[in-house]
Image (cartoon, rainbow, N blue to C red):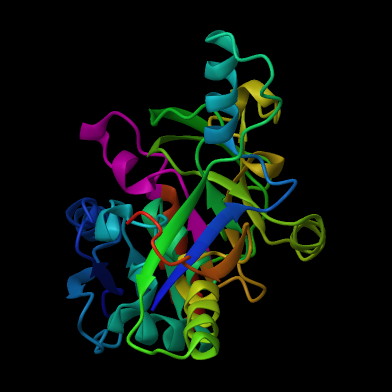
Amino acid sequence: MTVLVRVFLKEGVLDPQGKAINDALHRLGYGEVTDVRAGKIFRLEMSTADPGAALGAARKLADQLLANPVIEDFSVELAPAGAPR
Amino acid sequence: MSAPRVTVVLFPGSNCEEDALIAVRNTIGADARLVRYDERDLGRPDLVVLPGGFSYGDYLRSGAMARFSPAMDSVAAFAAAGGAVLGICNGFQILCEAGLLPGAMLRNAGLRFVCRDVFLRVETKRTPFTLVLTRGEVLRVPIAHGDGNWTADAETYRQLAERDQIVFRYVDETGDETPAANPNGSLGNVAGICNVAGNVVGLMPHPERCSEEILGNVDGARLFRSFATALLAHRS
């Protein structure tokens, strides 16, 4: 079972990387982009076949290690079947 | 009076551990040793230094992996018992990730790794490392980091200021905390903080790199000498 964990800086926390990417997109002419937030996605292969257990474990480990709750929020979801690896 | 006992914790990817050992030996005659990240026995130190570098390659976030090293369990227990802990650069990042100091590090606001001298204003004398310094005085100390943009939520920051936990701020040469004097965008120009008790201090600048005449600057030695004075007072 595959779980995706997405980690982003919290709203209101300055994202220097996202800002630089946003600025670069504007220089390339993509004026329709109004904001960019850069984050991380972790793809976890879990040994359990129980979706609840997999998501619960993912939430716990994301809170403990993958995200820093002081500055980051995270979300967890099961990877859709056939999703690109 | 026996020499101050200093333990420098070596993580995979640390690169300032020798500088830290030499600095405390040459400034305060410390009996200094390295303890590896996978050891639990810190060797009954008077001071633990978490050195600069790139522990665990700074993978995930700076300091995030080092926090789970066996040695960090011992450092946390040592700190909880009132032991003096100094985290320099990556060591400061580790202390934040471990929850021994509040806040967290973001990428430098300018996105660049910044390696140059900065000016620091001493904000409090309540830590062992600033005890004999003067509040408001300015030190020149080098920085070298890419993730030194310390931040915290508004309430945490308010409490830090209220509890006198801000130890150093980035200032210009005359002691003013201008935006231009802030090399990384840190909240409130914060360069170093301490815990509530004042025994755990973290700072991004490198005092161990400016502690001897041969290095062209001895401002950093004053932090170590201050610690030695604080230790004497504590022992007597």
- Residue A5 is left or right of residue B136, and the answer is left
Q: Is residue B111 above or below residue B206?
A: above
| Residue that appears at 32% across and 86% down | A47
Q: Is residue B118 above or below residue B40?
A: above
Q: Position of residue B186 (x, y in %)?
A: 62, 41
- The stretch in magenta equals B201-221
Residue located farthest toward the front when viewing the structure as drawn: A82
> Is residue B236 shown to the viewer in this render?
no
Q: Position of residue B165 (x, y in %)?
A: 68, 61
The stretch drawn in magenta includes residue B228: no
**Residue closer to the observer: B35 or A38:** A38
> Is residue B210 shown to the viewer in this render?
yes
**Residue closer to the observer: B43 or B180:** B180
Q: Position of residue B93 (x, y in %)?
A: 45, 58
Q: Is residue B72 above or below residue A24?
A: below
The stretch drawn in magenta includes residue B214: yes
- Residue B132 is left or right of residue B154, and the answer is left
- Residue B17 is left or right of residue B65, and the answer is left
Quadrant of the rendering where the C terminus of chain A is positioned: bottom left
Quadrant of the rendering where the N terminus of chain A is positioned: bottom left
| Residue that appears at 55% across and 69% down | A77
Q: Number of marks in the image?
A: 0
Name which quarter of the figure residue B173 lies in.
top right
Q: Is residue B58 above or below residue A56?
A: above
| Residue that appears at 18% across and 72% down | B33
Name which quarter of the figure residue A74 lies in.
bottom right
Q: Position of residue B228 (x, y in %)?
A: 40, 66
